Image (cartoon, rainbow, N blue to C red):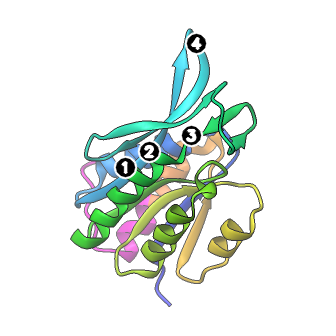
Amino acid sequence: MKIKNILITGKPRCGKTTLIKQLVKELNIPASGFFTEEIREKGERTGFKIVTLSGKEGLLAKKDINSKFKVSKYGVLLNALEEIGVKELEKGLQSHALIVIDEIGSMELFSEKFKKIVLKALDGDCFVLGTITIKSDPFCDMIKQRKDTKIFFLQREKFDELKKEVKKFLNQNYKIGFVSD
């Protein structure tokens, strides 16, 4: 079975989102999807937002928000994920773009709509580039075991090495052209 899904994992704050952003920027193909970015106030992380490749954004989680969904000190709001992130992935699947999913993690897994579109993307014809939590979770563990999925483990001190390794893998296995190194 040909590998068509590339997922980056690693400890929190090791650079997974940065790596995916750099790869997407350097890829020479249409892409659709989203990144999960930190919200910082006065140097402190206070939440997370969804930012799509087409420029839409919305609040995913914030400290002190009252929500039935919680991860650590953050209340999780599924509306932006489902109304912005999931819709962006659906649009990408229809246009046969590279599907970018940052990330398949604790906050996002509260959403059944999100899990459904992730499986549709992984099972579909489109190539998927994303990040996935290092933590064990039945849904994520199942994804990590897929034969059509390659997992790369990122360590901060080996960022450049892994970036080259992923680019080499992509260039060897897909007809994806990169803008110059």
Left/right placement of residue 74 relative to residue 148 reads right
Which one is earlier in the sequence, the residue at label 4 or at label 3?
3
What's the mark number on residue 80?
2
Task: Measure how far apart labels 2 and 1 are at the Cα level.
Answer: 5 Å
Q: Which tag is nearer the camera, tag 3 or tag 2?
A: 2
Q: Position of residue 158 (x, y in %)?
A: 61, 44
Which one is earlier in the sequence, the residue at label 4 or at label 2?
4
Label 3 sits on residue? 15
Q: Amino acid at mark 2?
A: Ala
Residue at the (34%, 58%) spot, across then down? 87
Q: Which tag is nearer the camera, tag 4 or tag 2?
A: 2
Query: Foreground residue, 22 or 103?
Result: 103
Residue at the (61%, 23%) spot, across then down? 45
What is the secondary structure assignment of the residue under circle 4?
A: loop
Task: Measure how far apart labels 4 and 2 are at the Cα level.
Answer: 24 Å
Q: Which residues lie in the magenta part?
A: 167-181
Label 4 sits on residue? 43
Query: Foreground residue, 91 or 175?
Result: 91
What is the secondary structure assignment of the residue under circle 3?
A: loop
- Can you tell which quarter of the image residue 99 is in? bottom left
Residue at the (77%, 61%) spot, across then down? 136
Q: Position of residue 110 (x, y in %)?
A: 63, 55
Q: Amino acid at mark 1?
A: Ile
What's the mark number on residue 84?
1
Q: Are marks 4 and 2 in contact (CB under 8 Å)?
A: no
